[in-house]
């Protein structure tokens, strides 16, 4: 206590709570914190590649990016590591355009097959024949077990596309073409016969008119 004579009174003591230990589990918790998301899922897809070909006229944005994506697929850099696309090549390097049009990055831009084909026709990096396309310098990417080409002969001088079209025309001539040709011949023959018959009729008419025509001798004969 304080001394009343000196007038000093000490400050009151603070009440201190007794220490109580926090309880804890004997075994550690089995809960695992969530793992960080993969880096690829946290980042966006790679940007669309720009075309290598310099087109002399402006393209709409869809065709522009489709051209860039297709040229990337058919580039040496991609084919050096894209074994699947090389498997789609025939023995002369031709790939169905439908294969490229079915890829997701192309389908995300357009589902129009004709647009894909027309865009490929603009590229200076590839060759297009009917519904097939191949890159320049395709020779080193063809696999040894590639399917024999239906587009081009092994020597490269004649192509099945041209021969096929000729065969197709001959086949048409052999079936429908033969029918049409036969019909045409029949038409010509019928016209010829009709013309002959008309000529005969004209001759008959002429003779009849000549025989029945007026003459002084005929008039005297009747009188």
Image (spheres, helix red, strand yellow):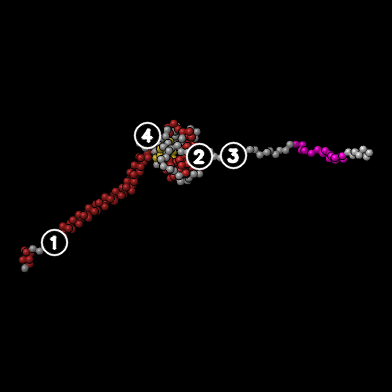
Q: Nearer the viewer, mark 4 or mark 3?
A: 3
Which quadrant is the N terminus positioned in? top right
Q: Nearer the viewer, residue 4 or 26?
A: 4
Q: Is residue 214 visible?
A: yes
Identify the residue at horizontal 28%, vertical 50% (top origin): 184
> Along the polypeptide, which appears first: circle 4 or circle 3?
3
Identify the residue at horizontal 42%, vertical 36% (top origin): 125
CA gap, disc 1 and disc 3: 105 Å
Residue placed under numbered mark 1 in the picture: 209
Q: Nearer the viewer, residue 20 or 28?
A: 20
Residue placed under numbered mark 3 in the picture: 42
Q: Nearer the viewer, residue 5 or 16?
A: 5
Other residues around mark 2 within 10 Å, as few (<14) / some (14–19) / many (≥20):
few
- The dominant secondary structure in magenta is loop
CA gap, disc 1 and disc 2: 90 Å
Q: Which region is colored magenta?
A: 11-27
Residue placed under numbered mark 2 in the picture: 48
Identify the residue at horizontal 45%, vertical 32% (top origin): 141
- Judging from the image, what secondary structure is the residue with disc 4 in? loop
Other residues around mark 4 within 10 Å, as few (<14) / some (14–19) / many (≥20):
few
């Amino acid at each position: 206590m304080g001394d009343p004579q000196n007038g000093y009174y000490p400050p009151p003591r603070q009440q201190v709570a007794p220490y109580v230990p926090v309880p804890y589990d004997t075994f550690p918790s089995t809960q695992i914190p969530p793992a960080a998301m993969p880096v690829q899922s946290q980042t966006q897809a790679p940007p669309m590649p720009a075309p290598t070909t310099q087109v002399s006229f402006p393209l709409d944005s869809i065709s522009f990016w489709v051209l860039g994506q297709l040229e990337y697929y058919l580039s040496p850099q991609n084919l050096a590591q894209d074994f699947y696309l090389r498997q789609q090549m025939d023995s002369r390097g031709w790939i169905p355009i439908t294969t490229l049009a079915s890829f997701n990055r192309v389908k995300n831009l357009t589902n129009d097959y004709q647009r894909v084909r027309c865009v490929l026709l603009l590229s200076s990096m590839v060759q297009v024949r009917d519904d097939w396309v191949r890159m320049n310098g395709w020779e080193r990417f063809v696999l040894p077990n590639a399917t024999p080409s239906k587009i081009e002969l092994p020597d490269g001088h004649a192509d099945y596309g041209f021969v096929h079209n000729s065969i197709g025309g001959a086949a048409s001539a052999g079936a429908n073409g033969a029918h049409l040709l036969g019909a045409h011949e029949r038409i010509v023959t019928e016209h010829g016969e009709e013309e002959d018959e008309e000529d005969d009729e004209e001759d008959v008419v002429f003779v009849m008119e000549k025989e029945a025509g007026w003459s002084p001798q005929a008039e005297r004969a009747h009188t």
